[in-house]
Amino acid sequence: MLRFIVRRLLQLIPTLGGLSILLFVWLQRLPGGPEYALLPDDATDEQRQALRRSLGLDEPLMVQYLSFLRRILQGDLGTSLQTSRPVMDEFFLRFPATFELGVTAMIIAVTIGLPLGYLAARKRGGVLDFAAVGGSLLGICTPVFFLAFILKVVFAEGLGLFPSAFRLSPGLGRTDITGFFVLDGVMTREWDVVWDALAHLILPGLALASIPLAVITRMTRASVLEVMGEDYVRTANAKGLHRTTVRTRHVLRNALLPVVTAMGLLAGSLFAGAVLTESVFAFPGIGSFVYVATQERDYPVLTGFILLIATMYVFINLLVDISYSLLDPRVRAQ
Amino acid sequence: MPTTPSSQSDEKIPFHQRKAAKVDRLAELMGDRGDDGHGAGIWREAFARMRRSPMAITGAVIVAVFIVVALFSPLIAPYSPTSQAWGNEVFPNRNEFVGPRGENWLGLDHLGRDMFSRMVIGARQTLMVGVVATLVGFLFGALLGGTAGACSVLGGRWGRQVDNVVMRVIDMMLALPTLLLAVTVAALVGPSLTTVMLAVGIAQIPIFARLLRGAMISQGNREYVLAAQAMGVRKRKIALTHILPNSMGPVIVQSTLTLATAIIDAAALSYLGLGNPDANFPEWGTMLSEAQRFLSSAPSLAVYPALGIIITALGFTLLGESLREALDPKLRK
Amino acid sequence: MFTKSSRKPLGLVAVAASLTLVATACAESDRDTAGGDEQPFVFGAPGDITALDPFLASDGETFRYSRQVFETLLDHESGGSEIVGGLAETWEQSEDGTVWTFNLREGVTFHDGDELTAEVVCANFDRWFNLTGAYQSSNNSYYWQTIFGGFAENDEDYAPPEPRFVGCDAEDELTAVIEVSEYSSIFPGGFSLAAFGIMSPTTLEAMEGQEITGEEGNPSLPEYSQVAGTVAGTGPFTVEEWNQDQAEVTLSRFDDYWGDPAGFETMILRAIPDETARRQALEAGDIHGYDLVAPADVAPLQDAGFQVPTRDVFNVLYLAYQQENEALAELEVREALSHAVNRQRIVDTILPEGGEVATQFHPDTLDGWSPDVRTFDYDPDKARDMLADAGHEDLELEFCYPTEVTRPYMPAPKDIFDVISEDLQEVGVTVQPTAYEWAEYINQTDSGNCPLYLLGWTGDYNDAYNFIGTWFSGPMGAWGLDDEELFERMEEVSTNPDADERIAGYQELNEMVMEVLPGLPISSSPPSIAFSADVEPPNVSPLTQEVFAEGSWK
């Protein structure tokens, strides 16, 4: 197991190295530089050139990349051009927001998707099955930003049930320990903060959950259907095992394997969905920051964030594989 | 989209590429069944099965209507989609819009243009974005995946090295969130219709590449390939005339599904301001993102293009999914 | 969260639970209840601030914050664009306009208890003048370089311009004299720029030695500009906290303020980049006011009981004719195009109420506006004929517009672009639309790559030069205009220290510009600002420089 993990971590190095070169060359080729985004409209050409030079952007690309590499080996991703704060700090300042949002979305997707998919498979061809399949297809086919918008118009603007923006109501003092608002609230027993933070997570969480929910529902359904047709289930039933036993130990457990795998993948893709959801809900997370960085040509932030996101993606999937091998002895044997 | 946890072709693939594994599984399913060597039988069988599936019929009808509207849009649209002939009747700054009426079946948009004509012409643009994006993903993906697959099957030790390198590149692309990839591509080229098509297409390359490679490797182990090799047929000929045609099935299924994804992703890019700047060619994604700000005062402006996108994407998804199901022996019941 | 049936992971759950318990036991709530009982006033801004020290900034959001906390020598009248005393009650300029004497207000205290004296004012100016290293980057001292030029010792790495600032002298306790090397019409307006907010001596001392660090290309702003606690001004609000992770700045009322105390006990500025999201946040009650209201939202908001006071116009939007394009170099073509655009329709249907068609390159609220400029009526037939006469029946032109921005002078750029390009197509011009993101848009238009494009300007201070001087004081890639006569006259007028002569000169210049027709002024539009019904809003400012201390709860 340990060797497996180490090997996987080593595989990470060439991937990230290649990615960094790719990103570096690619991003530097973006038209329009930070000297246009950062200075006011009436800045003169001299001022813009001076800024470009002082940011080291007039150096040959190779020189820039080498100094980037040297820094990265020291654990330094540079500083953001928009805020002049270290990229690493910016990432971890915003990471808790996106993480909380992603976890909320996954919880929504799993708690609804698993039972729904399972029930749909059990009652194949029934009304519930039809609704589950139809609903999940609809979920996949609806643009996330539009769904987010509709949710906001209906539940925040119209009914006033949930807040329409931010992570926390302005002016609500809180004790900062980890940056995860819900966790901090629980730890310090500031229950109003917990409640408020959760209320802010519901709508963006729902919007972000639409695709994972649809995928999990459909995968669970397909997977349960497949497992129910397997010989060992038939055998178990024939043996006269209790129905609950068969369902939990044989059907569910085996059917869950591919679903768990999919969850890892989905978790990775949540980052992309977060770009849209966070901008609609003015949710101060990684997604909205990356989007602004693209517009401002904030190269260090773009390079750094994309590398960090890619790393996390790989790590999430490593975790998935580990949990996978815990669930499935056959994988362990390999 | 079922995934069996362990299958022979999975062994070589690092576990973290599960998106890939899912894709490979489809490839393998296709490959496993080429008993007649040419696959025509499966297709005939699959179509017969699809004719009885309500899902497939719904999808096919939606897609057919969409394509007909798109192809003949200049004939269907009563007015020019850009003509602001009614520009003096609409006041977005005073919240005054014109709804459906005899002259304009779906009302006017925020600049006094005929909404119906824009929707119809928009269908054509949307179809074009979907098709071109899919083609970009398909062609480049197939080129990468085909090279890797062919090298892996026929190239011996040297070929496996090539395969390895190509797959590393593809893994790298897979690790990048697709929308982020698309956003940077779009920023690189500047907002335009070409940009959207390129950005969405490029994001699909790794999926197509993996799919084709998986299918080719699985074909590579079949008797007819060994037989051809034994008979001394040239390797390039084997790859091009035997393996490749037999591996196209999963790629075709994926293309149908990608059409749906491409349309939705294109809308997302438009929402982020990277869409088509040319008002002469309205496209549903751009229309939706432009109209979204009027959602509370004139919801229909946003709802029409949104429905257009959702229904069309649904059509392609239904068609693709039922095709996939029809081809998958395990789901045949 | 955990189902009962999962047996194996139970161990994990137990570990996690006990960890949480341990953590819970350790954590103490340290929330301060300083906020008081009154609810905070929350304002939705389009972006976060970039630094707590406005000197380092060049963006409107930082200045919006800093105007509440710091004060400048001169100010603009509340709700207007007239220059009035700020920290200086009165001021005088010498005959040649190079020596400026400021008589400071008495009894002004800083947030940290220090007293305002002429020496403090000079210490501030001396600090700015003597800054070194990365402070001299145009990104970190933009407005200093624009108004006062370079520094005591210019650092070649950052290539600042020649200094225009000569020195500051504290003549007595409350009289500060600032000398500049040459007169320019940017004075006295320059003294009112928010970047030059005066800070307390204690602050200056604490800032001493704090440098912009980091190796080349990776500047890191000093601590004092990032964490609240160091900077102290004289304004009606003090900085309580800057929460970067939520893009939120908290200000509280300064009780010893020399003027009327702030109406709100606490004010919070929070960033909501998306225009629609700001409106929705106001409607949902999450914020109590926001800026840059989309014109389309004004009516619905008013109908729903929100207050949307209208600012006076202080901006201009124009369609530029880049004359490196062969066709556009012909005056007749430019005239024809100017007749082709239905500007009235843009004002009637797209711009907010109070917007008007512009006849020249600055709003009529500004001295120097001329009633006698050449005007261009909407007349597509005439335009078509003129194009035919010029031999350009099938003219093809590239037309650029920016995506993903709204500017106060240009709400909904795409809509305005669509209307104009349709107008141009009507008279037979084939338009090639090109869209750029803002950063690239400025680059392309500045380099002269866009024959037709939309751009505009919101004034920083009350002088016509701030508008026409920005564009027509020399050859620029943006215009491709080469008119020595115009440039010379501009130079002559703008350096004339006599205000009346200068205004007459500006009128004449405006007439000249419209004869040359480097572009078509389209509109001046009032950028709207919205407040919830329970707020007594502050006076709205044409310069978008609201003093929120004037506002209060109803």
Image (cartoon, coloured by chain):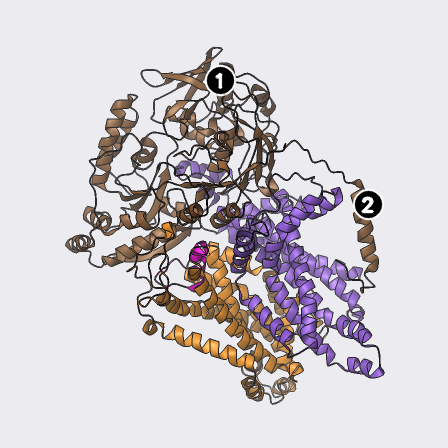
Q: Quadrant of residue A205?
A: bottom right
Q: Colour of chain C?
A: brown
Total labels: the figure holds 2
Amino acid on which the number 2 mark rests in the picture:
Val
Give residue B120's position: percent from left, percent from top: 38, 69
Task: Give coordinates of residue C30: x percent, y percent.
Answer: 72, 35
The image quarter containing residue C175 is: top left
Secondary element under disc 1, as helix, strand or loop, is helix
Check disc 2 and report the residue beneath it: C22
Decide which of tag 1 and tag 2 comes sooner along the chain. Answer: 2
**Amino acid type at image mark 1:** Cys
Query: Residue at image x 61%, y 80%?
Result: B30
What label does residue C122 carry, if any? 1
Q: Which chain is purple?
A: A
**Distance from the alpha carbon under mark 1 to that under mark 2:** 55 Å
Q: Chain of mark 1?
A: C
Q: Residue A171's x, y, as percent?
A: 61, 38
Vertical placement of residue A269 versus C259, above or below: below
Chain with colour orange in the figure: B
Asked if residue B251 can be seen in this view, the reply is no
**Circle 2 marks a residue in which chain?**
C
Q: Nearer the viewer, mark 1 or mark 2?
A: 2
Q: Is residue A18 left or right of residue C487?
A: right
Q: Is residue A145 above or below residue C244?
A: below
Circles 1 and 2 on the same chain: yes
Q: Within the magenta stretch, is there residue B66?
A: no
Mark 1, other Cα within 10 Å: few <14 / some 14–19 / many ≥20? some
Q: Nearer the viewer, residue A287 or C37?
A: C37
For numbered disc 2, what is the local secondary structure? helix
Q: What residue span does the magenta drawing correspond to?
A: B273-295
